[in-house]
């Protein structure tokens, strides 16, 4: 897990209630501010899959500095990233372009600082389809080309998303009841001609309660 996102809720209730369903309203739109705390999850086991789980992370060492991701209205780029509905970032650090519709949430491309070099994904990364509830699955292929320090880099792969668990989530700031866990596995093939050819695998766990926007 790269980040754990925290907020205040009521005390824990009974396990085993019908888990929530994730829709487009739980994903970013222009004007949203996503606030969270960073925490070191090195060596932390993400817990079991299945129904009626209790994921206990009450002892996590959470940073005290609040982080904020701000999502913006669509912007014009050259080349254009067509079809995006919201943007994360700023002119100093670059942007990431997303499409959030009633059907799915998709990563469309990104840019570097100053919005100088824009990468339009030739096959965008559709990370999740809606509605998404316990035992839902989603698989999508993706590809894009970028330039890193003057070298052309080709990236392609597959993203697999599954709501593999339901139950209660315990965090240092409180307890979240009736949640689903969404597990996203990304397998990427990275090629730099005559220089490098390898793979990269990443697994992301996120918890949703259907009440708070964004992962918990």
Image (spheres, rainbow, N blue to C red):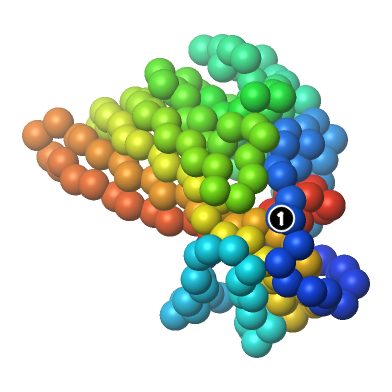
Image coords of residue 208 (percent x, y): 70, 55
- The residue at the point 63 percent across, 40 percent down is 132
Can see residue 194? yes
Residue furthest bottom in the image: 59
Task: Write down the quadrant of residue 207 in the picture.
Answer: bottom right
| 175 left or right, relative to 113 | right
Image coords of residue 45 (percent x, y): 47, 76
- The residue at the point 47 percent across, 25 percent down is 124
| 160 left or right, relative to 75 | left
Note whether 166 is above or below 149 in the view shown: below
Image coords of residue 200 (percent x, y): 29, 50
Q: Classify mark 1: helix, strand or loop.
A: loop
Note whether 83 is above or below 109 in the view shown: above
Task: Write down the quadrant of residue 96 in the picture.
Answer: top right
Note whether 147 is above or below 206 in the view shown: above
Note whether 83 is above or below 38 in the view shown: above
**Which image quadrant: the C terminus?**
bottom right
Using the image as rendered, state which of residue 167 and residue 111 is in the foreground.
167
Using the image as rendered, state which of residue 161 and residue 190 is in the foreground.
161
Using the image as rendered, state which of residue 170 and residue 60 is in the foreground.
170
- The residue at the point 57 percent across, 60 percent down is 165
Task: Write down the quadrant of residue 65 in the picture.
Answer: bottom right
Kindly identify which residue carries mark 1: 19
Residue furthest right in the image: 10
Image coords of residue 110 (percent x, y): 53, 31
- The residue at the point 32 percent across, 35 percent down is 157
Q: How many marks?
A: 1
Can see residue 114? no
């Amino acid at each position: 897990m790269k980040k754990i996102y925290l907020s205040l809720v009521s005390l824990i209730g009974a396990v085993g209630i019908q888990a929530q369903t994730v829709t487009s309203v739980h994903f970013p739109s222009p004007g949203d501010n996503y606030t969270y705390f960073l925490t070191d999850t090195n060596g932390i086991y993400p817990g079991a899959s299945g129904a009626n789980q209790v994921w206990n992370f009450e002892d996590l060492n959470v940073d005290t500095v609040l982080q904020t991701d701000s999502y913006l209205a669509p912007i014009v780029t050259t080349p254009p990233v067509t079809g995006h509905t919201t943007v994360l970032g700023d002119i100093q650090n670059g942007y990431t372009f997303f499409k959030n519709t009633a059907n799915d949430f998709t990563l469309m491309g990104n840019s570097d600082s100053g919005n100088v070099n824009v990468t339009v994904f030739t096959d965008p990364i559709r990370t999740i389809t809606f509605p998404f509830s316990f035992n839902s699955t989603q698989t999508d292929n993706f590809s894009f080309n970028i330039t890193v320090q003057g070298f052309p880099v080709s990236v392609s792969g597959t993203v697999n998303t599954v709501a593999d668990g339901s139950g209660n989530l315990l965090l240092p700031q409180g307890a979240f009841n009736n949640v689903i866990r969404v597990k996203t596995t990304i397998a990427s093939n990275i090629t730099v001609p005559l220089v490098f050819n390898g793979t990269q695998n990443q697994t992301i766990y996120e918890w949703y309660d259907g009440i708070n926007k964004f992962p918990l």
